[in-house]
Image (tube, rainbow, N blue to C red):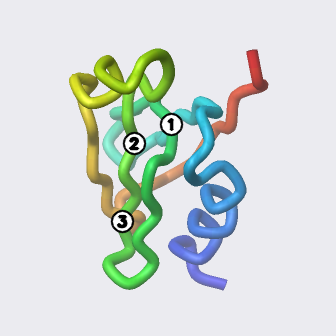
Amino acid sequence: MEDVDVWVFALSSVEGKQQRVTVHLYGGQSLKGAVVELDRARKTVVLDEFAHGSAATRHESPVHTILLTAVQAVTVHKVE
């Protein structure tokens, strides 16, 4: 199983939910957010930093599109 397949499997369980994850990238950078989209064809994941609260707040929050090939590890946080 390729690394990308592992990340797709790990992130698909929280896709579209408000559960927080941290995606650790090669090179040491980490991004936190909620998985709003997992594009299996393009092998990308879209994280919304503040995917909770009102709809207006959600649309204003920073969104990151990450190539799954750049992912080194994923941490799924406990539900608060």
Residue 34: x percent and y percent?
50, 37
Q: Amino acid at mark 1?
A: Ala
- N-terminal label among 2 and 1: 1
Marks 2/1: CA–CA distance: 5 Å
Pointer 2: what residue? 47
Determine the image quadrant of residue 29.
top left
Marks 1/3: CA–CA distance: 14 Å
Is disc 2 in contact with disc 1, using a CB cutoff of under 8 Å? yes
Q: Residue furthest front?
A: 55
Q: Is residue 80 left or right of residue 24?
A: right
Q: Amino acid at mark 2?
A: Leu
- Quadrant housing the N terminus: bottom right
**Residue 27 against residue 53 in the figure, above or below:** below
Q: Is residue 49 left or right of residue 22?
A: left
Name the mark on residue 44. Answer: 3
**Residue 10 against residue 39 in the figure, above or below:** above
Is disc 1 in contact with disc 3, using a CB cutoff of under 8 Å? no
Instruction: Classify 10 Å Cα crowding around label 2: few (below 14), some (14-19), many (20 and above).
Output: many
